[in-house]
Amino acid sequence: MCLGCPKQEFWMAEHKDSIKSTKIRIGAAIGFISGESYLPPLWIQKIGLFWLTRLISEPRRLFLRYFRTNLKFIYLFFKQFIKQKRQNNEKN
């Protein structure tokens, strides 16, 4: 069953108790295997910009998702960073 994000996460959470098995999210793997989507060059993958090539190839579908999740990540990162800085200053 392939639902895509975030439907697959909601489905797995809804069925976590009723289906006793390991559930694996496969994301864009089906598109890559089927040839519908193409992998970026290896150097782009190695420098961690795989997400950027997907965003460029499907901006309508991915922009809001990446924008929301990346902003949330940046917010939580700096929140934790500031908290640790304060704790380190209190120790010194």
Image: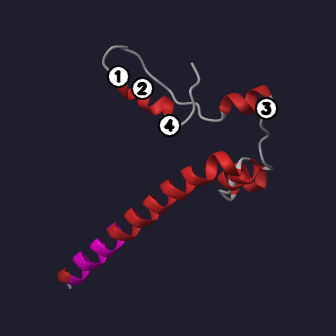
Element at label 2: helix
Magenta span of residues: 80-89
What is the CA distance from the residue labelled 2 to the residue labelled 3? Answer: 25 Å
Q: Is residue 7 above or below residue 19?
A: below
**Residue in the picture at 18% in, 80% down:** 91
Q: Is residue 76 left or right of residue 43?
A: left
Q: Quadrant of the N terminus?
A: top right
Q: Amino acid at mark 3?
A: Glu
Element at label 3: loop
**Residue in the picture at 76% in, 48% down:** 57
Residue 14 at x, y percent in the picture? 36, 24
Total labels drawn: 4
**Residue in the picture at 41% in, 16% down:** 21
Q: Nearer the viewer, mark 4 or mark 1?
A: 4
Q: Which residue is mark 3?
A: 36
Residue 6 at x, y percent in the picture? 50, 37
Count residues near mark 2 (Cα–Cα under 10 Å), then give few for <14, some for 14-19, many for 20+: some
Q: Which residue is mark 1?
A: 16
Q: Earlier in the sequence, mark 4 or mark 2?
A: 4
Q: Is residue 51 above or below residue 33?
A: below
Q: Amino acid at mark 1?
A: Lys
Q: Which residue is mark 2?
A: 12
Q: Amino acid at mark 4?
A: Pro
Q: Is residue 8 above or below residue 91?
A: above
Q: Is residue 82 magenta?
A: yes
Q: Which mark is residue 6?
A: 4
